[in-house]
């Protein structure tokens, strides 16, 4: 049994793309109640729930009720037999205030939480007794991968075609590249089981019937 001071491995997830269906981002972004899991995401969460891993959302998000979003995510996870342990949101905009795409002055400028910065993961470590060296991040973009790597996690890229410009710097290289979220979950659970397998009992003597 783990002591009260023991640390836990975690899996960090972004809500975009592989976890939440793309239609919500396009059409229902202001209504968290209409979020639905992406194809294969339910099976991935069911698989992750089979291992003692803390599941944590780390996502860029603003202009929506984060409390309602987290409540809906908890419901979606629970339907899969999984538990959402925490959710962290970066509301900041990296665009310049004079960029024609716009940025709210309140959230514009540099921060330590917007990926590829590892701030959300480091906060989760402090607040939820997470062992980052035994944790994983699953993402669709190079910024996700770099954030996980900088925090000391193993980062898995789900290759959904959403990373238009790939870079080969060491900080942005994933531990593995997989096709989808389910394949990432399968790899993590199998790897966790292998690395935390109980050793076979030591044979102390030979006995004959």
Image (cartoon, grey):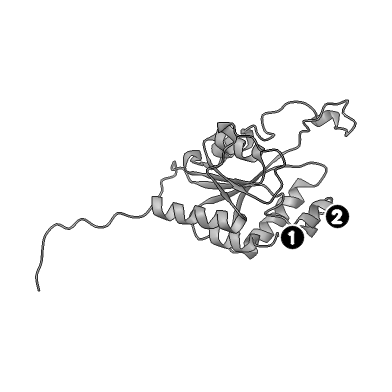
Q: Left or right: 206 with respect to 60?
A: left
Quarter of the view holding residue 43:
bottom right
Q: Nearer the viewer, residue 55 or 171?
A: 171
Which residue is located at x 56 percent, y 57 percent? 183
Which residue is located at x 68 percent, y 60 percent? 75
- Quadrant position of the C terminus in the picture: bottom left
Residue 122, x across and y down, in percent? 58, 35
Residue 24, x across and y down, in percent? 80, 55
Look at mark 1 in the image and give the residue it sits on. 36
Secondary structure of residue under mark 1:
loop
Near mark 2 (Cα within 10 A), the count class, few <14, some 14-19 or many ≥20, is few
C-alpha gap between disc 2 and disc 1: 12 Å
Labels 2 & 1 near each other (Cβ < 8 A): no
Quarter of the view holding residue 163:
top right
Q: Left or right: 133 with respect to 78?
A: left
Q: Residue furthest right?
A: 100
Which residue is located at x 76 percent, y 57 percent? 35
Q: Nearer the viewer, residue 127 or 108?
A: 108
Look at mark 2 in the image and give the residue it sits on. 27
Residue 132, x across and y down, in percent? 51, 39
Q: How many marks?
A: 2
Up-down relation of residue 6 to residue 43 (above or below): above
- Residue 82 in sight from this viewpoint: no
Near mark 1 (Cα within 10 A), the count class, few <14, some 14-19 or many ≥20, is some
Q: Residue furthest bottom?
A: 209
């Amino acid at each position: 049994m783990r002591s009260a001071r023991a640390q836990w491995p975690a899996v960090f997830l972004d809500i975009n793309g592989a976890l939440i269906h793309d239609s919500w981002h396009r059409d229902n972004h202001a209504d968290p109640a209409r979020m639905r899991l992406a194809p294969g995401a339910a099976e991935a969460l069911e698989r992750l729930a089979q291992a003692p891993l803390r599941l944590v959302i780390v996502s860029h998000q603003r202009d929506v009720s984060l409390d309602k979003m987290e409540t809906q995510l908890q419901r979606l996870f629970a339907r899969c037999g999984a538990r959402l342990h925490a959710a962290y949101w970066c509301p900041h905009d990296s665009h310049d205030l004079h960029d024609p795409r716009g940025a709210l002055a309140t959230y514009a400028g540099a921060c330590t939480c917007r990926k590829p910065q590892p701030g959300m993961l480091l906060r989760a470590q402090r607040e939820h007794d997470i062992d980052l060296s035994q944790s994983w991040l699953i993402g669709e973009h190079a910024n996700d991968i770099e954030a996980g790597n900088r925090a000391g996690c193993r980062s898995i890229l789900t290759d959904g075609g959403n990373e238009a410009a790939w870079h080969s710097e060491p900080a942005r290289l994933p531990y593995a590249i997989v096709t989808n979220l389910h394949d990432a979950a399968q790899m993590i659970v199998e790897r966790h089981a292998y690395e935390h397998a109980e050793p076979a009992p030591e044979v102390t003597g030979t006995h004959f019937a």
